Image (cartoon, grey):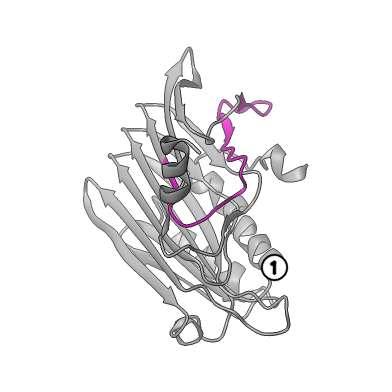
Amino acid sequence: MNNKLSQNFIDGWLGELELNFALRKGRSVLTKCKHTGPFYVKKSFYSKNDNTPHVYLLHPPGGLVGGDKLILDVKLESGSRALLTTPGSSKFYRSNGIRAVQKHIFTLDRNTALEWVPQSSIFFPKTKAKIDTTFILEQESKIISFEMSCFVNSSLGICVYPEEVDIFLNICLSNSVGLQERLQINESNCIVKLGGFKISALLFAIPSDEKILDIVRKLITSVKYFQVGGATLLDNILVVRLLGNDNQCLKKLLCNIWYTIRPFVIGRKMVLPRIWLT
């Protein structure tokens, strides 16, 4: 085995994707798509009567092991908009002692709109992983984002937890303090931190107000198929947190919230990403 290939097996594989969106002739288009390694997009899709490009992030290996790193850098130029998602869940497998890393950076210029709605992250037993996500928003920019994280594997009849998962979220706003938070899960604290549940979900939307908060709270309290959930407003940031054991039920609730608040936050009616239907 040559030295370069041997080093790849030791250090893991690197995937980098840099995307840039801009407004051209009244339509948002993908103006830059630069990638390294097995992390890319094929093309943008558009729905009828909506100039928002739907972009599907592809990672053919389908999962990460210790030492792997995926870096996503997205920029929206003034006046542009985009919806980004993934065709399937991100899977983090058993570690060789080194962390698997995902790093996301989203930069939104003035008067832009981003929807970042990836499928869930699944952390298998003995996983060591770090997810670091940063959003930088200028004035008049809009965003809706949600993610689900599944931490417990019970397929063999017993609950097995990841060794170490570290999730960072940083929202930087030009006219507010924004939001910073960190969730650390490991084999010893998983039950306590998740209250005995297997799945944690987070949704946030900017800009939001008391009207949107009230709508979301009613949606949450009207649903019977999940165990714990709540919503709060931090300045103009709507934050929704859910805990449960059924991935599909939680996703259904998150999507229902997304569909309902999109006209208020993004200014457009909801259009489901086509790849979710395949």
Q: Position of residue 251 (x, y in %)?
A: 65, 61
Q: Which residue is rendered at x = 66% and y = 40% of the image?
A: 273
Residue 210 visible (yes or no): no
**What is the magenta segment's predominant secondary structure?**
loop
Q: In this rendered view, identify the residue nearer to me: 161 or 97.
A: 97
- Between 45 and 223, the one lying in front of the other is 45
Rendered view: 203 above or below 44: below
Residue depicted at x 63% and y 26%: 46
Q: Split into 4 quadrants, where in the image is the C terminus?
A: top right
| Res. 93 image quadrant | bottom right
Residue placed furthest toward the top: 25
- Residue sitting at x 67%, y 85%: 158
Circle 1 sits on which residue?
Answer: 249
Q: Is residue 56 magenta?
A: yes
| Place of residue 39 in the rendered image (x, y in percent of width and height, measured from the top left) | 52, 36
Res 219 → quadrant: bottom right
- Type of amino acid under label 1: Cys
In the rendered view, would you say 38 is above or below 229? above
Task: Residue at 62% x, 47% y: name it.
Answer: 62
Q: Secondary structure at mark 1?
A: helix
Q: Which residues are magenta?
A: 44-71
